[in-house]
Amino acid sequence: MEIINSVITFFGENIQIIYILILSIFVGIEVISKVPSALHTPLMSGANAIHGVVVIGAIIVMGHAEEGNWLAIILGFLAVILGTLNVVGGFVVTDRMLEMFKKKK
Amino acid sequence: MQNQYWLYLIYLLASVSFIVGLKMLSGPKTARQGNFLAAGGMTLAIIGTIFLHKNEEGHLIGNYAWIFGGIAIGTIAGWLSANKVQMTAMPQMVSLFNGMGGACAGLISIVEYKHLHDTASTGAVITILLGLIIGSVSFSGSIIAYLKLQEIMKKTFRLPAQNIFTIVLLLLIVSMLVITIQLPAMFHLYLLLILSLGYGVLFVLPIGGADMPVVISLLNSFTGLAAAFGGFLYDNQVMLTGGILVGSAGTLLTILMCNAMNRSLMNVIFGSFGGGNAAVGADDGFVGTIKSTTPSDVAILMKYAQNVIIVPGYGLAVAQAQHVIHELEELLEKEGVNVRYAIHPVAGRMPGHMNVLLAESNVSYDKLVEMEQINDDFSKTDVVFVVGANDVVNPAARNNPASPIFGMPILNADKAKTVIVSKRSMGKGYAGIENELFGYDNCLMLFGDAKASIGKLVAELKEL
C-alpha cells in the first residue's frame, strides 16, 4: 500500500512532466510518419544525435558532485565524455551522410 | 530565479529545434538544415545548462574544469572518428555513438542512485533504475552490433533454447529491480547493472547482419527512453522532450524498416531468418545451370541495349566500386543508353545506404529509383546489372513459400531480357540461402571483384 501511495504521489507531483511525455510521444510519431526509405539511415543517425541530450544529465551530475566524492566525479566525467561523443559524433556523421544528397547539376 | 527562467526559455527553444529538425530530416531537400538546426539547439541547451542550471538547493554548476575537459575530449574524439569513418562503415559508427549515449545514461543512474537512494521517493528510485537498465541494454547491445557490422565478431550465436533463456533473464531483471527498490543497496544496483548488460549482449548476438539496421534503430529508441528517464529525474524538459521524441520516432522508424522487409518486429527479434536456424532452403529451389560470362560480352550487350538498370547491393560498397559504376553509367549514357539504378529499400546494410554511397560518386539523385517506381519496368529492360546484391533479387521471395525470405518484396530483376550478376563467387547472400535466379536461362554470372570487373567492362566499352 505504501508503495502504491508513493507512486501515486510521484505521479501527482509530476503531472505536468507526464503531460509533456505523452504529447512528445505523439509528436515523435507524427513528425516522421512520411519519410522516404532513402532517408531512413540519416534520420536514424540524426535521432541518435538528439538523444545525446542525455549529456545534460551528465553535466548536472558532474556539476553538483561534492569535492572528494570520487565515484561521482570519475563516473560523471566519463559520462560527460561519452555523452559529448554521442552528440558531436552523431551530428557530424549525419551531416556527412546528408552532404551526399546535395543536388547535382 | 530569473536565471532559471532564461534556462527554461533556452530549453523550450532547444526542444522546438529538435522537433522541427527531425521534421526537416525526413525530407531530402531540408534534411541538412534540419540536422544543423537540431545541433544548434543542442549546443544552446548544453551551454545554458553549464552557466545557468541550479539544483534544488540553488547551487550553480561547479567543477568547470572537469566538465570542459570532458566536453573537449568528447568533442575531439567524436569529431575525428565521425570524419575519418568510411561511408561503408557508417552503420556501425551510428551504433557505436548510440552505445555511448546509453552508457552515459547508465553512469548517471549509478551516481544518482548512490547519491539519492536513502532520501528519494520510490518514484524517483524507479526512474533511476529504469534509466540504468535501458541505458545498459542499449550500451552492450550497440557494442555487439558494432562488433558484428565491423566483422570483428563474425559468427551469429544462438544458445539452445535462446528464447527461454532470454525470458528467464528478463524475469531476473524485473525481480532484481523489485529487490533493489525494496532493499536499497549498491550491491543490488551492480547486480542489476550486470544483468542488464548481459541482456543487451544476448539480445543482439543471435541477430544476423541483414537485420542489424532494425536492431540499431531499436536500440536507438532505447537510448532515447533512457535519456527521457534522466529528464524525468531532473525535471529537465529538454532531456525529456528530446529523449521521448527519439524514443517514439525511433520506434516508428524501426517499424517502417521492418515493413520495408515485409517482416514484423517480433520476427526480427525472435525469428530465425538471419539467425543460426536459417539452414532452410540450403539445397532446394536450385535448378538450371550457372552460366558465366566475360567483360567483353557484357560490354557488347550493354552498348546495344536501350535500357539498363543497375541493382546495387552491399557488395558494391565492400568493393568500393561506386566510382567505377558511375563511370560505366556515364559511358553508356553517351552511347544513348537509358541507365537507372534500382534501389531496394534494404539494399546494403541500411536503408538509404546505396543512395549515400552512389551520391558520393556524383550519381545524380534522380537516377536512383525506388523499388515501387521501377519494379514494373524490369520486363521492358534489356539488361539488368546486379552488383553485389543477392537476396533482394531472389525470386524465391515471390514463389517459394518454404524460403525464409518468402514474402519479402524484391526487385523483379529476373523479368528482364538479360540479367548480369557481378559476384565474387557462388557464395550465399546475407540471408544465407541460395539464389535460384543464378540458375535462370536469362542470367549470366560475371565472377570477380566488382571493382575490377566493372573496370574491365569500362575498358572494353571504350575499345568498342
Image (tube, helix red, strand yellow):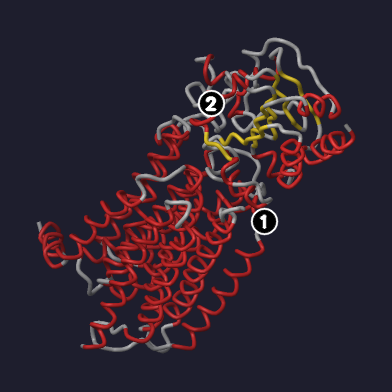
Q: How many labels does the image show?
A: 2
Q: Position of residue B2 (x, y in %)?
A: 22, 88
Residue drawn at (57%, 54%) of the image? A103
For numbered disc 2, what is the local secondary structure? helix
Asked if marks 1 and 2 touch (Cβ < 8 Å), the reply is: no
Name the quadrant containing residue B187: bottom left
Assess disc 1: are there few (<14), some (14-19) or many (≥20) residues with their C-alpha within 10 Å of its C-alpha: few
- Separation (CA) of disc 1 from disc 2: 31 Å
Q: Position of residue B205 (x, y in %)?
A: 54, 42
* Amino acid marked by disc 1: Gln
Q: Position of residue B162 (x, y in %)?
A: 47, 35
Drawn side of residue B286 relative to residue B331, left or right: left
Answer with mark 1 or mark 2, whichever residue precedes in sequence: 1
Q: Name the residue under label 1.
A: B86
Q: Residue B375 carries which label?
A: 2
Residue drawn at (71%, 12%) of the image? B441
